[in-house]
Amino acid sequence: MKKALKFFKWFFLSIIGLVGVALIVLFIIGIPKPGTFITKNVPKIGIGNAFSMLPHLSNINFFILFGFDNSQNLLFGKPSGFYVANVENNSIESFQGALPFVAYGSSAQRLKDSNTFLYLNVKNAEEDRDLLQFNTETGERETLFVGNSSVTSFGISPDNSILLVYNEDHESSVNTLYKMSLNNDSVPQALCTFKGLVEVQGFDLNMENAYVLQSYSEKDGKLYRVNLETGEAELEFEEEGESKFYHGIQFTWYARHKRFLQTKSDSIAYYVRTGSSGLSKEFSVIWEYNKNTKSLTQISPELKGDIGHIALTADERYLVYLFMHKGYSQIHAYDRVEKKNFILYNDTENPVALMGNIPFLLHPDQNKVYFSKYSMSSKELCQVDIENSSLEIIDPDPSAPNDTDITFGEFTYPTTESSIGLMNGIHSFIYKPKQPKTEKLPVFIIFHGGPDSHDIPYNAGMEGFVAPFVDDFAVITPNYRGSTGYGMTFEKADDQQNRGKQIEDVKALVDWIKTQEDLDDQKIVLMGVSWGGFMTMASLAKYPDLFLGGISMNGATLNPGAPREAGLLVGWDEAEIGDRSDPDINATIKQVSPVTNAKSISKPLLLIQAERDARVSVESARKIVKALEAKPENKLWYIEASEAGHMSGVSNPLEGIYLFSTMKQFVDELIDN
């Protein structure tokens, strides 16, 4: 026994010694660069940066709702694993096995009266997807459709007989809607082709037609009726052939929000889009559509905000919908019997979270809605009874981070224009430490991607890129010109030849910072991912004297020598950026493009680019690197991730640790110098 104890004693001491030696080595040589990274000019990254960043990375917390199984248990996921909630007695159990639905853009739909879910499987960094099915009881998985290049949406008929699959071909840009039978192993039948994005919205009652929403961007959706036998596609609304209508936030980016719902009465449906008068010209609203008379009647109230996802309760009495206003999300409902709208959930200190593909779920039989809410200190899975609006917490999640040391605020700063649509400036969120280390706080400005997207409150303060820097900075997240949720005029205000105004607004933000006594306008750092990376690089090029430097991660480049930003963005690029063969559009692009203006970037830049990015060309990023290397006085750190894509940024946790640690060291050196 003594020999055994002695062995274990020396064994554990040896392990501790090896760990100690490893830490000493890491302190000397720094964090090892991942083998999948190509770097230029990046110095040794101290292990202390990893220690300071790891708590924030481990605190990232979310709920993703997947759906109800055949026993009416709610399946959901969070960083700690996958779970099954018995919503009748509020008991939570770990799901035995892995749910494969947790992938960007993978909207899960359950086959009726079964435990089989259909979902999109992201198979590589280029965002190519196949359609798979997964049985949560047996764990069996089967591929139903192999995309070429990518399946981006699908729809199941209510009787489980028909499956529609939309496949995008990134090379030809000709995308095809296929019909399959779920009752046998039939070969997919090509129905018709579209350009741009298509979301399957539903079927009529006799299964003769399907409804699909086609769009190039957030601003130009069209609802088509597709004959399931002939494949003939016709516009459901003639006016959508000539005029452009907006269908609410996050249609373009695979958020899977439902915009068109068929009721059990074949003559009545509900539809989300903008209108032609009043606030409905600026914001998406809900219309009751009488298919017999072809008439649309607005049923949602005139509010300064957009309607998003809509869903009908099982008894079809209530139409439940997501309402979004200035970044805050609420849940409203329309009583089809009483003909009135009412608010189910609207807590601005604990707004609805928009993680995953669907913002809320309805109970299969009962009039109850399920969603997650969040604040600066918690995230919770909730249930609201639609009949009485009572709120019940299903899972309070004690593992959620608690950012009680952060203060949160919002403000609107003026631009050179007195108004942009309904806005008199740029609405922004600001996070500060409650106990600042300095009299004047340095400023860290983070631009969201899109640009047709928006930042949300609180959530950013708890996770992502804000929390790692808010101890030392005032972090500002502006919903810049072109962001969604502030009206169509505001969203279109950056399009095409107005692109330069988007960058001029950044200078206006600096002017506002100068008026704040607790903010240091001499110490401003920029950062952005995707379109936010473009904002960072373009701002550094146009106003180099205003900033210490910036970080761009997979930043859009607007390379004037390319027909579009990337093959994945056919249609969107033309709507947002413009026809690049047009001399005026091309001139605007050259004025703001980080590729043509790279030599004007005289302040330090950390440029991070995924080689397998399907939205931003790595070749354009390399052109920026080449231009900056021609000016040795410019400080450039460059990281190219060979296995990562646009949406992932990294392909494994070690890459994430290295990447975030490099960001921390880069920013620290900017402030110290």
Image (cartoon, grey):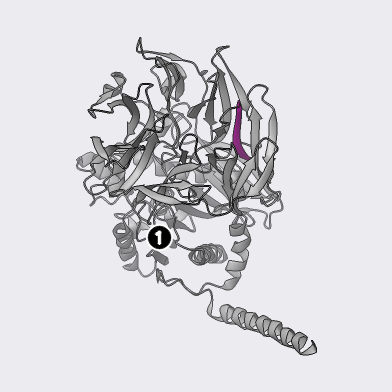
Instruction: Locate the C terminus and report the quarter of the image it occupies.
Output: bottom right
Instruction: Locate the N terminus and report the quarter of the image it occupies.
Output: bottom right
The foreground one among 408 and 336 is 336
Mark 1 Cα within 10 Å, few/some/many (few <14, many 20+)? many
Query: Is residue 238 placed above or below 231 in the rendered structure?
Result: above
| Residue 368 included in the magenta stretch of the image | yes
Which region of the structure is painted magenta? 366-375
Residue 514 is at least partly visible in this image: no
The foreground one among 660 and 229 is 229
Question: Which residue is at a point 29% across and 41% down the rendered structure image?
Answer: 186
The foreground one among 271 and 300 is 271
Residue located farthest toward the front when viewing the structure as drawn = 184
Where in the figure is residue 221, as x and y percent of width and height? 34, 29
The residue tagged 1 is 644
The foreground one among 219 and 439 is 219
Query: Is residue 244 placed above or below 541 in the rendered structure?
Result: above
Residue located farthest toward the bottom when viewing the structure as drawn = 3
Name the chief secondary structure element in magenta: strand
Where in the figure is residue 244, as x and y percent of width and height? 32, 26
322 relative position to 614: left or right: right
| Residue 361 included in the magenta stretch of the image | no
Residue 98 is at least partly visible in this image: yes
Where in the figure is residue 234, as x and y percent of width and height? 26, 24
Residue located farthest toward the right when viewing the structure as drawn = 2
Q: Indicate the secondary structure of the residue bearing disc 1.
A: loop
Q: Amino acid at mark 1?
A: Ala
Where in the figure is residue 332, as x and y percent of width and height? 57, 25
Residue 331, quarter of picture: top right
Query: Is residue 141 placed above or below 311 in the rendered structure?
Result: below
